[in-house]
Every structure is written in C-alpha cells, then in structure tokens.
Image (cartoon, coloured by chain):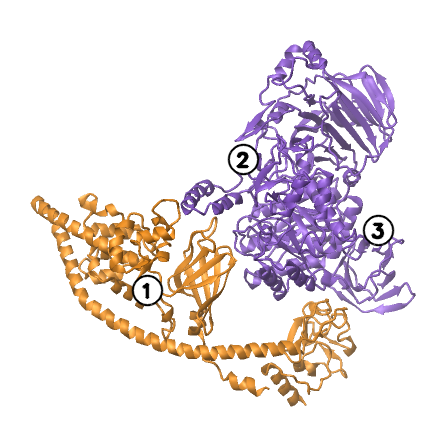
C-alpha cells in the first residue's frame, strides 16, 4: 500500500495527472496530502508534526489550533501558519494557505477548499489540465521548431563571421596606408614642436596646408559617418523616413520635417546611396545632429593655431567626453606612451574618441565599412553567435498609442502613433539575464531623461519563438520599460517531451 | 496630486512642433530644478492678504465698540443688543444664545447691511436647540445673564463692549477683552456710486468725518492684486475680526489643517495660522500655512477645563494665538499672575458667528461640537482595511497583477485605487478606452476576491462639448460663474475645466444622480469614490484656487471658499447612498474639508513626501483632525512625492496600520513600491504590520461605531483621556486608539529605542504582543528592532481581535474572536464588541447589530447585551480568551445562557502571566459566563 501511494503521488506530480478516474480515494483527514497520510492515524493520538505536542485525534481539524506548526488543522483555517492540500485530480495538486479555506473564494480547482462557506465552486481541474497539456504541447512544438531554426541561425552566423573576418583582414592590409598617413601627421606635429621660430613658421605653413586637406577629408569622413548613422536599416540607402528621424534638418523651421522636405534634402529622390548622399550632404551638414557623438565644432580647425595640432585636439576631445563614454580608462595612457602605433592608440580609445581620432588621422581614407565591421565583430552575439542575425535589424510593435521599435544591439525607441517626435528608450547596454541564463535578457540604457526621474531604460526579455518579433511592451515602473521579444535564438534543445506527452493519452 | 503636474502636461501638449518642446523643456528645467519644497511665493502671507493686514493692524486696548444697552431685547431663546462703533457710528446687531449642552452662541452682523452678508448654511445639522437666558442684573455698565447651573454667568459690559463667561469667581473666557473686535461694514463704491448715496452713509460721514475718510483711504480695499491675479472686490472691504481671551490656559489645539505639532504655537512675530483650502505643492512642515482643508474650531485645555471655540465662517480666515502671564482676574483672591492665551480670529467676509463650547471635560467638548455639526459617518467595515493606491495603476492587467501580488505574498487588502489616468482624458465618470475598456470585468474580478475598488472623480469638469457631464452641467447652467456672469473656467488635469457650483442643491442632486449604475457606466457595487482637488484646485488661479470674485449664485467665491470641498464630498456620498436605494453606507475620500465634513467620509493629509519628517507629522495632523470631529484620517503611506527607503516604507506601514485611514499612495514619477518589491524581509515586515491591522479590525470598527454615536475621536491625544496629567499636554509622537490602545510608532531613521510615556499613575499597561506588564505614570524605554511596533493595551480593558487573517476583511466576516482581557491592578477589566453586517444602514434603520459588554470582575468574565432592542445573528464565535496579568486557575468553567456548564481547557504561561482559555466556542452574540477558580 505504502509503495502504491508513493507511486501514485509520483504520477500525480510528474504526469500532469491525467484523468485518474480510476484512483481510489484514500481516506485521510481533510487537507492532508497523501505523502503525510501516515502521520494522521485516527486510531492513535496525534502528535504535531514538529513533535511539540500530542493531542487526542478528535482534535485534528476541530477548528482550534493546538500545534504551533499548524499541523493539527490541515483542513480548517484555525492555524495562522497552516496549509491545505488540494488534490486537484486532473490537474496539479497544490497547497494553499489555510487562511483560504472557507473564505468564500474558490482556490483549489477541485473546489475542496470551500466546503463550508456557501461558495459554490465548480471543479475546473480537468479543463485546466487539458489546457495546460495543450499549452505545453504547443510550447514543445515551438521549442522544437525554434531550436531547428536556431541551428540554422548558428550556421549562418558562422559563415557570416568567416566572411567578415576575411573582409576585416583585407581591410587591415589596406590599413597600412593609413598608418603611414598618421605617421606623417605625427611628424608634422613633432616638427611643429621645434622651438625655432623659422622652423615653426615653416611647419606652420605646412600645417595650414595640411589643415585645409584635413578639413576636406574630415568633411568626407563626417558624411560617411552620417550616412551610416542615417541608414537605420543598413540597406545601403538613406531614405525619406530615415532622414525624418532627424527633425532638426527641417528646412523651413516649422518643426516638422515633412516627406516633401525630406525628399528635397535628398535632391528629390526617395532614397540615395552613399555617393549620391555626398552631394546632398552640404544641404544638411549645418543642421545635422549626430545620434552617436556630439559633433566636433566645425570651427575646430580654425582655432588658435596652438591648439589645433592633432595632439592637442585629441587631448581636448578625450577630456571632454568622459560623460558620454563610460570607459573611464580611455585617456589614462595617452601621454606616457607616445610611440605606440596609431592603431594601438585607436584600440585604446572608446568608440567616440576613435571616431574623432580617425577624423584627425585622415579617416576618410579608411573605408567606413571597416569601422562598421569592427564594431559588429565586437558585439557579443551569444555563445554560438546565434543572435548575430538580429544585428542591424529593427522590429516594431504598434500599440494603441505608440509605435515601439527595437533595433537589437543598437537602440529602443517609442514614437507616438499619430505624429510627434521619437523618444529614445535606451541604447544597447548589455546582456543582463541571470548568471545561468545571461542571454535571456537585454538591457538598453541611457534613453531620454524623465522629469524628476531616471533616464529611460528598457529591459528586453527574450523568449523562444519561431518568429522574431516584439510581442509586448509595458512600463512597469516610471520610465523603465519592459519588452517581450521572441526569437528562435533562445530556444533550448527540447527534451524528449514529445513522446512523453503522447504516452499519457 | 500637486499642481506642478500642469507644467508637464503643458510640455506634452506642446510636443508638436518639436522645436517648441525643446524650448519648453529648457524652461521647465530652469523652473523646476530648484524646487525642493513649497514655493512660498505662490501663497499669500498675512501682509499680502489686505484684510488680514488691516485687521491685524487693529491696535489692542482701544475698542471703539460700545453696547447700546437701551436696545437690549431678551426673548425666550435669545438676547439681542445693538453695538455701535464710536468712530464711524455704524451699528451692529449682536445676538446671544444659550444653547443646550453648555454652549453659548454669539452672532454679530451689520444692523443695516447694504446687502445681506453670507451666513454659512449646511454645516450645522440643525438649528441648535436653545435654553432660556435669564437676566440676573443690569446697570448702566452692563448686564449679567444666567447660563444655568454652577453660577455660570454671561457678563455683557457696555463701554467698551466686552463679554465674559464666568463660573463662580472664575472667568472662563472673555470676548473683545483686548478690543480687537472689528467689523468692516459695507459701503457704496466711491468710483461708481451716484450723488444720492444713502442718508445713512452721509450721516456717518458727518458724524466722524476724519476717521471715516481714513478708513476709506486704506489700500487694497476695492481691488487687490496678487502676482498676476486681480481680485475685483466689487463689494469692497467686508472683513471681521474678534478676540477671545482664555485665562488659565496654556495649551490650545485644533484649527486644522496645518502641518504642525498638536499643540498650537503662538503666532507673535509670525504669520497667523491660515485657514484657506489650498492645493499646496510639496508642503512644508511646522508652519502656519494653509493646506487643503479647514476646520475653524480651536480647543483649549488645562487641568481645570477643556473648552472650544467654533468660528463658523467659510471665507479666508487667519487665527492669531498669543500667550502671556496675565493679572489674575479672580477678584476674590490676592492678585497673582496666571497664564493666559489670547486668540484672534480674522475672516474676509460673512458674519461673526461663534459657538463657545464650555466643556468642561474633553468628552463634553466633543459631544458639544458633535451636537452642532454631527459625528463621523460610520464607514463600511472594509473601508477600515488596507487600501492600495498609486498614481496610476495603468490598466486592467496592472490591477489584476497587483491584486494577484497580494495573494502571492499573502498580504491582505480591501481596496485597490485608480487615480486620474483611469478616465478617458480625465473626463471623470468615464474609462480610458485603451487601458480600462472592460471596467465591469475588472470590478467583477475584484468581487470574486471579495475586494473593492475606488475610482477618482474630481470636481473639475473638462470643457468639451462631446463630454456628457460637461454638456449637462452647462445646459442646466450649474457651473460657477466668473465675475462677468460667464461660466468660470480654469486649468486643471483635463485642461480647460468648468467647476460645478456645488453650493447649489440642484447641482448636488444632479451630481449624486450621476453615481447611479446606469449613469456611471462601468461602475458596480464594489466601486467607491475619491474626490481629490476639491479645494477647489485651479492650476492657473490665484494661489492655485478659484478667483474670489467668481460667483456661486449671488454669493462670491470669497464667501463660500472653504465650504466648496465639503459640498463636493456631500454630493458624492449622497450619490453612493442613492445608487443603492439608501441601503449601503458610502465610502468617499476627500482632500478638502470643512467643519461637518466628518459626516461624509474620510480625509487624508494630501500630497506629503517620502521623508521621515512627514511620517512623524502624520500623527499630530490626524490627531488635530480627530479633535475637531474628523476621525477618519490618514496620510499617504510611503509618502506621495519622492521615493521612500525600505526602512521608511516599513516604518510607515507600521504607523499607518495604527492610523484610521490606511492607504499607501505614490506619485506617478516614483518607482513602483508595492509591498513585495523590497526583498523578502521587508515584505514580511509589511505583511506583519498589515496583519496586525486586520486582527484589530473588530476594535477599529467598535471605535468608529462609537465615534459615530458620540463624536468621540478614534485617534486621541493622551490628554483627552488623562486631562489632569500635564505631561501629556504636548505629546504628539504617541497617541491612543479609543481608550485602550496606546501607540508609539517608530518614526526615526535607524531607531534602536523609543521612549514611551505610559500615562495613568497606579494603572498598568501590557505590551500588545509580548504581554509584558508595565506600570503607568512612567517613561518607558523600549528597545526596538525593525519588526517592533510599540503598542500597549490598557490594564482594565478587554479588546476583541480576529486572529485568522485572510485576503480581505470581507473574507473574515464569519471568523471567531479572541478576547484579550488585560487585568487592572485590581483584577478587573471591561470592554465591548460591536458586530453588524458591515456595510448597510440596517444597524441604524432596523437595529440589526450585536453590541456586547464584557466584564471581568470577581473571577468571572461575562458577556452581556448592551442594546437589548437590537437584533442580529452572527456566525462568529469566541475562539479563545487571553487573560493578561493572570494567576494560574485550578479550573475554568463556561456557563451559557441555555444553562449548560462545561469545563474548559486552558494554558498558563508563568513567564508572561498569560492565561489562555481554549475554545469557549460560544456565539459572539450570546450571553455567557466564564468562571475562574484560583
């Protein structure tokens, strides 16, 4: 019998308890789980399960609490710390606090908690059980298919990575040229530091010439950077809607950059590629506000000559940008290590500073794809790069009031459905799931600030799904957003649940 | 909610075009960055309120008023007498009444006013019944009238006019003894009046030309400007002022609402206490600035006597308090110095109408005041449970998940609240279609859990031709008018808003009808109402309220201002009663209030902040309200503005659990703070505090039943029960609930101990949880941990608790009681139990209730019926009896009314001297006796 009971219990727990119509109702006091049946022997006095006291058995479930652990009243609300066992045949058995016995609210799906309250509870266990099995089965299917998709994603990511690596090394080869350029610059600078007046004048002249060249190249670099920035969907074109994310470009100053105005800025075209964009750039450069880094003041190069040497400029920028870039150690080694290669310098700098430096070191010569690639490669796309496919993609969800946009590894934003400007809900921060499941949660931080509150931030919870989609958004706390995002990339290898589920029928 | 939100709203409205929003954002940053507390410059000081300045400039000692004794008329019910101002020859009419219950009423109006002056309606529950005044003596110096027993007399002195209420040789109170009576008579407007001014005025001018001119010349009499707002003052100066002296008095209390200690301070050298209902953004503590509500009742207390002054005036009012050591006016004894407190009342308009409540005991004053303005409404039992509020629960799913959170964490609660965002564009009586599209479904979900909801319905109405409420009020012409006769419009949450004229009975009746289930779509029986912003708050009005020259029928807003909030709550409470066909008791919370508001529901202390100082001041603020009849008071648990530390939040729950209205609330911009969001330890601490509240609900319910019946406050200063113990007169960090529980909440950060004053020399107190016994009449040092809530039960009392804590109070209805019998040093104890259905008027209309008295004396505990003509059957029974301070008995025997006798099991704990009698099992409504053999 004892063996039987245990087996039965195990079945109850494990099998999501199918009908069990054939189960014999095992006699025991109300509210006692089968596992504790042996402690409630009506032929004997009852000893509290904590051993604190022994009472006549007729005081079990007599609606007066005798045991400190509440074990004498498993079926009444008499003990403040008691619990009641619902068998819930057909569904999962469960415990409820004894304060929920006969409180007029049906808690157990079998209705056994309301035996004397006047509440009429329907037995909903079979229905719940059926629904749960269906849900589990559906989940299993999703997991299975999702996991297959994930394998493909991993494959693709591998290929993509190899490609990128090889492109990167190609680019690295061509970088030699840039290094030379930088070295030249350095020479200019070092020569300029000569105290002799003559030399200084000569070099100054050279510097003036160089400055003009620099300005031109900087302009190009800036344009290239802007193009990248504007091209939100990374399709190699900047189109009208992408341009409209920059309302500051509004030519007539009425505060709205209309479709027509945007098109005007793009020279009448609906979208332009990078070459065409170069021609249009002059129309907007005055107004354009960068998404990533604050623009270097255009007067930079026209300042007092003493401050325009690259070194000075670099220092100035690095010092001024601590608040934007969290790398505290950016400028630590700038001065005591002057002979490091420019590329080493580059690596030590934060993204923004790197971009600045590149401007100075004739970055226009570096194909911007190099920076983009480098940036992309730097992301943590998961243990098998299964999240790589999300890079440079954006996913939208439209609610009653807003359009939410998640661009993984980039940013989250919110835009009123019926016009109005976009609000940043955060830029890519980090993976921030629990230690054992780091890749289940993404954190986007430092969005637009809230009045008397923090900067907006968004937590993105990833769940397994066949589709890649934003399925819900909410703002659980002021200015702290929560997004639910489904992707096959988090689907775990399904256990052999398939057979299990079917076996039970 | 505070005023500042409007700025944010503005910025949202201006989001398009974006450039402008940028500008606005900059401006906001500039405007807001420095704001930490109230911007005092938004609110008037006495000097900035011209009438206050004029009245305060009146110099003591030279009263121009003289009683014309030849005009004295004495009828059965009243005495009338003319007063003349010798400076301008304007005559006033004085009326004196001796009221039943040891009160005197004094009214002064102009004898021949140019136009009627406002007399406050709807505050007194009836014309106070009078008793005959009889003339004792009269000479050219004055008259003496008898006030009945105890050689109590009213002495009227003629020159200058003065009143003294004396008892035997003692002067209890004097009126105009400092000569500060002032009554600005109405006069024709100089700039508009024709040549043919009334003869009376001409006569006056002839009589006292110089003085009269001097009066006319004072600034701001006919128009005054504060900040950008001009008050047109079409009726000119109409202020009134009067002084009262209280010999032998050092302690005065009352005149809420101020963020102030219980004992009022003197106002010499500072502003007077101001009574003018205002929506004050981030109010400051310990100052006399006006807040959301006003009750013009001041209590004086000494070891000898407690008295009250009720200044029935709804206009802007200022109260000066000063104290001095005065010559002993007791002529019999040798001259000596005694303490004296002087009080001066100043109001902008209306008449002087004062009720002097002569006590002599605190309970007498409460009864006297209750006989005038009524008692605390008897709330439904569940309204005494815990309320979970936040600006705002966002949608139905949010409501559902918070509700579930309470179950998941096993914390009881009765009400979840919806703030302004629940309505469709702040159109009250509607639901936001996106977030609350199925309100009945949501409410039914709460019904299924035996819980309720409160939705906010504010008194400002969005001006929107598509909004039915607006359309109907406009078409019925029931909005407050501006000075030019058009509908008054101001800014509030919905943008441009109209303000219904709640002073109009037709408006109130229509408003009440809006709460019918078929009018308020989506409402159900378990939906109750919150009236916020009923000062009224007008974001762009002077001092964030309505212009004084706005019109309510023929009366100016100036006249009725402090009454507006009361009318809003009155109409709403009526609506809730009516929707149930007069069966169900309403629950309405309001922020603004006036004398008499106690009849309509609960109030709270408005938009406080998550700071320790605000936790601390919640005690005196609610004590002060309790003294003037408003017992159902609470403060936002956790603090409205800012975000509390977990320690502060826990301490606030522990305090709030022992204050009458127990609601957590939070500002929109603060992080979520449902009780389970601060880690398991804090969740457990909060759970325990809330559970203590629920265990004591039977006691709370009894206290409210008695407050409703007698006007005695629920939450009481110690001096109310220990009126001769001077130590108690300034205590406001601890208090009594009823007579029998003393509470000293921990309100300091990092507290390791509190010092509790246990009053009552010769008595004893028992720790409510450890049952440790302490002597009365001592300062007790109590070490505290985070779980400590120092609460003590008075030796000699019996308190029923329900120890089976469930999800909501409704779920506990049928549960059994445990009686806590705390023995006095004499081995006796007494207590009561009140039970009814918890929510209807049947207790009143059909006498359906149980009211028992428990007496422990002579080794016998008995339960007897206090109200034999009542009838109610309860399922509850007596589960357990604890005798605190007991000896070990040899046997305990239960005798029931049926005559059965049974021996009961019991435990005795030697360490704590607690005797626990197991399961008497008798019905809570039955007669029974427990006999103890020692």
The chain painted purple is: B
Residue for point 74% across, 55% down: B381
- Callout 3: helix, strand or loop? helix
Residue B919 is drawn in which quadrant? bottom right
Report, in whole angstroms, how far the alpha carbon at label 3 lies from the one at label 1: 78 Å
Q: Colour of chain A?
A: orange
x then y, percent, for residue B300: 72, 34
Residue at the image point whose x is 48% and y is 57% from the top: A402
Q: Are marks 3 and 2 in contact (CB under 8 Å)?
A: no
Whole-number angstrom distance, CA of label 1 to CA of label 2: 56 Å
Q: Secondary structure at mark 1?
A: loop
Task: For residue B906, say whether it is visible.
Answer: yes
Q: Please determine whether, in this image, residue A8 is positioned above or below residue B249.
A: below
Looking at the rendered image, the disc whose residue lies closer to the viewer, 1 or 2, is 1
Judged left or right of residue B705, residue B588 is: left
Q: Residue B496's quadrant in the figure?
A: top right
The residue at the point 36 percent across, 73 percent down is A385
Label ID, residue A235: 1
Q: Residues within 10 Å of mark 1 (few under 14, many from 20)?
A: few
Residue farthest to the top, as pictured = B206
Per the rendering, the mark at residue B845 is 3
Residue B602: image location, x then y, percent:
69, 47
> Is there one chain holding both mark 1 and mark 2?
no
Q: Position of residue A231 (x, y in %)?
A: 33, 60
Read off the chain for label 2. B
């Amino acid at each position: 019998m004892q063996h039987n009971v245990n087996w039965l219990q195990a079945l109850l727990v494990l099998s999501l308890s199918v009908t069990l119509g054939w189960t014999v109702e095992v006699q025991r006091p109300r509210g006692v789980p089968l596992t504790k049946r042996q402690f409630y022997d009506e032929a004997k006095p009852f000893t509290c399960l904590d051993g604190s006291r022994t009472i006549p058995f007729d005081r079990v479930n007599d609606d007066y609490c005798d045991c400190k652990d509440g074990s004498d009243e498993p079926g009444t609300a008499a003990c403040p710390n008691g619990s009641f066992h619902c068998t819930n045949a057909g569904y999962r058995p469960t415990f409820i606090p004894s304060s929920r016995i006969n409180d007029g609210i049906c808690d157990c799906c079998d209705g056994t908690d309301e035996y004397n309250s006047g509440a009429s509870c329907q037995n909903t266990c079979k229905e719940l059980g059926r629904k749960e099995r269906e849900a589990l089965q559906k989940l299993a299917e999703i997991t299975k298919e999702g996991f297959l998709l994930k394998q493909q994603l991993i494959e693709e990511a591998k290929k993509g990575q190899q490609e990128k690596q090889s492109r990167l090394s190609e680019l690295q080869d061509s970088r030699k040229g840039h290094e030379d350029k930088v070295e030249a610059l350095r020479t200019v600078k070092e020569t300029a530091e000569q105290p002799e007046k003559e030399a200084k004048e000569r070099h100054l002249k050279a510097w003036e010439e160089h400055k003009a060249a620099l300005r031109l190249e900087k302009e190009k670099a800036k344009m290239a950077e802007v193009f990248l920035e504007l091209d939100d969907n990374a399709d190699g074109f900047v189109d009208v809607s992408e341009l409209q994310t920059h309302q500051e470009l509004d030519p007539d100053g009425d505060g709205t950059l209309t479709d027509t105005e945007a098109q005007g800025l793009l020279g009448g075209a609906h979208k332009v590629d990078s070459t065409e964009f170069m021609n249009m750039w002059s129309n907007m450069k005055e107004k354009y506000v960068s998404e990533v880094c604050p623009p270097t003041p255009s007067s930079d190069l026209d300042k007092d000559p003493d401050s325009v040497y690259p070194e000075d400029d670099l220092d100035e920028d690095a010092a001024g940008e601590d608040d934007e870039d969290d790398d505290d150690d950016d400028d630590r080694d700038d001065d005591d290590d002057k002979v490091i290669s420019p590329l080493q310098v580059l690596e030590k700098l934060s993204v923004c500073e790197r971009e600045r430096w590149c401007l100075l070191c004739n970055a226009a010569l570096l194909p911007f794809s190099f920076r983009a690639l480098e940036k992309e490669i730097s992301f943590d796309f998961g243990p098998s790069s299964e999240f790589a496919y999300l890079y440079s993609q954006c996913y939208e969800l439209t609610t009653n009031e807003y359009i939410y946009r998640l661009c993984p590894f980039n940013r989250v934003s919110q835009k009123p459905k019926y016009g109005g400007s976009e609000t940043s809900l955060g830029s890519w921060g980090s993976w921030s799931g629990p230690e054992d499941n780091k890749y289940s949660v993404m954190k986007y931080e430092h969005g637009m600030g809230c009045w008397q509150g923090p900067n907006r931030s968004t937590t993105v919870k990833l769940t397994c799904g066949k589709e890649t989609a934003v399925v819900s958004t909410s703002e659980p706390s002021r200015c702290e957003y929560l997004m639910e995002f489904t992707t096959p990339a988090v689907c775990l290898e399904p256990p052999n649940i398939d057979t299990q589920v079917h076996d039970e029928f | 909610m505070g005023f500042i939100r409007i700025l944010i709203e503005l910025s949202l409205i201006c989001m398009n075009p974006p450039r402008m929003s940028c500008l606005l954002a900059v401006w906001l940053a500039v405007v807001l960055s420095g704001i930490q507390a109230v911007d005092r410059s938004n609110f008037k000081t006495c000097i900035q309120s011209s009438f206050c300045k004029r009245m305060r400039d009146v110099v003591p000692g030279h009263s121009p008023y003289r009683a014309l004794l030849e005009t004295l008329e004495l009828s059965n019910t009243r005495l009338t007498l003319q007063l003349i101002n010798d400076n301008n020859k304007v005559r006033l009419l004085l009326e004196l009444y001796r009221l039943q219950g040891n009160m005197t009423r004094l009214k002064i109006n102009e004898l021949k006013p140019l136009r009627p002056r406002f007399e406050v309606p709807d505050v007194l529950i009836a014309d106070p019944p009078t008793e005959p005044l009889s003339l004792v003596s009269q000479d050219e110096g004055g008259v003496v009238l008898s006030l009945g027993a105890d050689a109590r007399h009213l002495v009227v002195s003629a020159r200058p006019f003065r009143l003294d209420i004396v008892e035997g040789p003692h002067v209890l109170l004097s009126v105009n003894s400092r000569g500060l009576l002032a009554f600005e008579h109405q006069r024709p407007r100089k700039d508009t009046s024709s040549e043919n001014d009334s003869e009376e005025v001409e006569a006056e001018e002839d009589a006292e030309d110089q003085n009269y001119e001097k009066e006319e010349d004072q600034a701001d009499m006919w128009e005054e400007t504060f900040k950008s707002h001009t008050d047109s003052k079409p009726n000119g100066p109409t202020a009134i002022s009067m002084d009262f002296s209280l010999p032998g008095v050092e302690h005065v209390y009352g005149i809420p609402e101020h963020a102030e200690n219980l004992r009022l301070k003197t106002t010499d050298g500072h502003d007077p206490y101001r009574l003018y209902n205002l929506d004050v953004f981030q109010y400051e503590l310990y100052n006399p600035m006006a807040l959301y509500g006003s009750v013009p009742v001041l209590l004086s207390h000494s070891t000898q006597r407690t008295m009250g002054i009720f200044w029935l005036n709804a206009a802007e009012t200022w109260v000066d308090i000063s104290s001095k050591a005065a010559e002993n006016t007791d002529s019999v004894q040798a001259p000596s110095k005694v303490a004296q407190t002087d009080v001066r009342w100043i109001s902008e308009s209306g008449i002087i109408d004062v009720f002097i409540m002569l006590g002599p005991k605190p309970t007498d004053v409460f009864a006297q005041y209750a006989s005038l303005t009524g008692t605390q409404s008897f709330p439904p039992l569940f309204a005494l449970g815990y309320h979970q509020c936040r600006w705002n629960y966002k949608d139905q799913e949010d409501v559902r998940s918070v509700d579930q959170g309470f179950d998941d964490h096993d914390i009881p609660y009765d009400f979840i609240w919806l703030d302004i965002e629940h309505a469709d564009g702040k159109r009250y009586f509607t639901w936001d279609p996106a977030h609350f599209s199925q309100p009945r479904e949501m409410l039914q979900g709460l019904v299924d859990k035996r819980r309720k909801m409160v939705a906010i319905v504010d008194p400002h109405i969005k001006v929107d031709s598509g909004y039915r409420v607006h359309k109907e009020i406009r078409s019925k012409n029931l909005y407050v008018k501006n000075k030019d006769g058009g509908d008054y419009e101001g800014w509030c949450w919905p943008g441009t808003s109209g303000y219904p004229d709640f002073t109009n009975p037709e408006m109130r009746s229509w408003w009440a009808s809006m709460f019918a289930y078929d009018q308020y779509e989506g409402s159900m029986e378990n939906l109750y109402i919150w009236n916020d912003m009923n000062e009224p708050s007008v974001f762009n009005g002077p001092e964030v309220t309505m212009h004084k020259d706005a019109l309510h029928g023929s009366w100016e807003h100036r006249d009725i201002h402090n009454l507006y909030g009361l009318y809003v709550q009155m109409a709403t409470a009526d609506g809730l009663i009516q929707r149930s066909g007069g069966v169900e008791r309403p629950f309405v919370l309001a922020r603004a209030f006036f004398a008499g508001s106690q009849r309509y529901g609960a109030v709270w202390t408005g938009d406080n902040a998550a700071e320790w100082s605000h936790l601390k001041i919640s005690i005196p603020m609610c004590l002060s309200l309790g003294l003037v009849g408003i017992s159902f008071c609470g403060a936002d648990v956790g603090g409205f503005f800012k975000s509390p530390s977990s320690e502060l939040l826990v301490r606030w729950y522990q305090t709030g659990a022992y204050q009458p209205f127990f609601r957590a609330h939070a500002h929109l911009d603060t992080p979520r703070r449902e009780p389970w969001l601060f880690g398991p330890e804090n969740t457990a601490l909060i759970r325990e505090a809330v559970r203590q509240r629920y265990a004591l609900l039977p006691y709370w319910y009894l206290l409210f039943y008695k407050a409703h019946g007698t006007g005695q406050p629920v939450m009481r200063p110690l001096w109310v029960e220990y009126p001769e113990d001077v130590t108690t007169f300034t205590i406001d960090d601890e208090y009594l609930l009823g007579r029998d529980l003393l509470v000293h909440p921990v309100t300091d950060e990092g507290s390791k101990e509190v010092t509790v004053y246990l009053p009552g020399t010769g008595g004893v107190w028992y720790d409510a949880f450890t049952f440790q016994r302490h002597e009365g009449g001592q300062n007790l040092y109590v070490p505290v941990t985070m779980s400590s809530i120092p609460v003590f039960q008075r030796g000699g009392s019996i308190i029923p608790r329900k120890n089976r804590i469930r999800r909501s109070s409704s779920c506990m209805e049928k549960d059994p009681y445990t009686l806590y019998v705390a023995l006095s040093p004499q081995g006796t104890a007494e207590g009561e139990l009140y039970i009814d259905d918890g929510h209807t008027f049947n207790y009143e209309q059909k006498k359906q209730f149980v009211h028992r008295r428990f007496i422990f004396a002579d080794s016998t505990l008995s339960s007897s019926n206090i109200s034999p003509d009542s009838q109610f059957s309860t399922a509850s029974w007596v589960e357990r009896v604890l005798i605190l301070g007991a000896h070990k008995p040899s046997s305990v025997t239960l005798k029931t009314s049926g005559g059965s006798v049974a021996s009961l099991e019991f435990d005795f704990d030697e360490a704590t001297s607690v005797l626990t009698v197991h399961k008497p099992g008798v019905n809570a409504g039955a007669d029974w006796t427990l006999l103890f053999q020692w």
